[in-house]
Image (cartoon, rainbow, N blue to C red):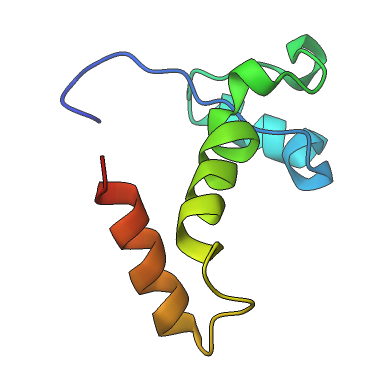
Amino acid sequence: MFNNRHWVFQQDSAPAHRAKSTQDWLAAREIDFIQHEDWPSSSPDLNPLDYKIWQHLEEKACSKLKAHPNLESLKTSLIKANYKN
């Protein structure tokens, strides 16, 4: 999977991700993942999408409008903001 390259599956602390059934499911399929007991607590370094990237995109895509009139408008604005230098 993923061009035969090694990877580690990292989850957040959502209850469904911490659930024993989820942890057992991953282990049974020999998916390399970090056991929830070993997860660091709320580290922004582990999830830059939530802590920095969304904030940046929101500032760029939503700064000129009070609200987008529809989902397509929001999507278009986010895509344009993502590709601007």
Q: Nearer the viewer, residue 52 or 59?
A: 59
Q: Nearer the viewer, residue 80 or 42?
A: 80
Toward which corner of the image does residue 34 lie, by quadrant? Answer: top right
Would you place residue 65 above or below residue 37 in this image?
A: below
Look at 62% across and 16% down and name the residue there: 45
Q: Nearer the viewer, residue 54 or 4?
A: 54
The x and y percentages for residue 47 are 60, 28
Would you place residue 84 above or below residue 62 in this image?
A: above
Q: The C terminus appears in which quarter of the rendering?
A: top left
The x and y percentages for residue 3 are 15, 26
Q: The N terminus appears in which quarter of the rendering?
A: top left
The x and y percentages for residue 38 are 76, 10
Q: Is residue 77 left or right of residue 17?
A: left
Q: Is residue 83 left or right of residue 16?
A: left
Look at 57% across and 25% down and name the residue there: 10
| Residue lying farthest to the bottom in this orientation | 69
Would you place residue 19 above or below residue 77 in this image?
A: above
The x and y percentages for residue 63 are 55, 62
| Residue lying farthest to the left in this orientation | 3
Look at 62% across and 37% down and name the residue there: 25
Q: Is residue 44 left or right of residue 29?
A: right
Q: Nearer the viewer, residue 42 or 64?
A: 64
